[in-house]
Image: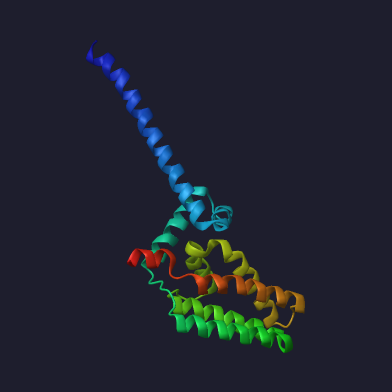
Amino acid sequence: MSTGTLLAIIIPIVVVVALAAVAISLMTRRRHLRERFGPEYERTVQGADSRMAAERELRQRERRHDSLEIKPLPSASRDRYTREWTSIQQEFVDQPEDAVHDADRLVTSLMHDRGYPTEGFEQQMKDLSVEHGRTLEHYRAAHEVESVSTRSRATTEQLRGAMVHYRALFDELLADGGGRAQAARS
């Protein structure tokens, strides 16, 4: 067999294998992002110019999140937060708008104590999406009602819903003992 014939056989095989490796790599990366971000993956894809741009954004979020010092709360802090949440729930009976605002502040304080930056809602959402993508819709919904209630336009039912939504993220942040961040330090 001549060298030319051998090259004509080997080169296409190498190209096919390389293309298959790239395709497998992209599929693996996509699956990882979908699993890690949950519903936030699809939301980001829908809001981006392309799937590639959305996945690039999600990988940037992962890198930023990995640079943060997310930490578990000491038991005393968890107990204090639990007591504060109970107090806010009791406040809801007489002052629902104030309770929703207090719930928002408490969740933000909890995020801060865990090590999440709290410089703005959109950045909070991006930072939380890496570990808490499955509860972000709760946070979005609660924040939206909290914004409406600032203008005294939220109904009692909306305020009650906001409290339920805040509670979902609050419970996850409180119970999360550091997740991957703690495992990485161990």
Residue 64 location in percent, x, y?
Answer: 40, 65
Residue 6 location in percent, x, y?
Answer: 27, 16
Residue 155, image quadrant: bottom right
Report the number of numbered marks: 0
> Is residue 119 visible in the rendered structure shown here?
no
Residue drawn 54% across the image and 73% down it: 121
Looking at the image, the residue that sits furthest to the left is: 3
Residue 100 location in percent, x, y?
Answer: 65, 81
Residue drawn 44% across the image and 44% down it: 28
Question: Residue 79 or 65: which is nearer the viewer?
Answer: 79
Looking at the image, the residue that sits furthest to the top is: 1
Question: Residue 80 or 30: which is nearer the viewer?
Answer: 80
Quarter of the image with the N terminus is: top left
Quarter of the image with the C terminus is: bottom left
Residue 156, image quadrant: bottom right
Question: Residue 22 or 80: which is nearer the viewer?
Answer: 80
Q: Where is 109 relative to 13, above or below?
A: below
Q: Where is 36 relative to 166, above or below?
A: above
Colour scheme of the picture:
rainbow
State left or right for residue 186 relative to residue 147. left
Residue drawn 54% across the image and 62% down it: 133
Residue 101 location in percent, x, y?
Answer: 63, 83
State left or right for residue 16 relative to residue 91. left
> Is residue 87 visible in the rendered structure shown here?
yes
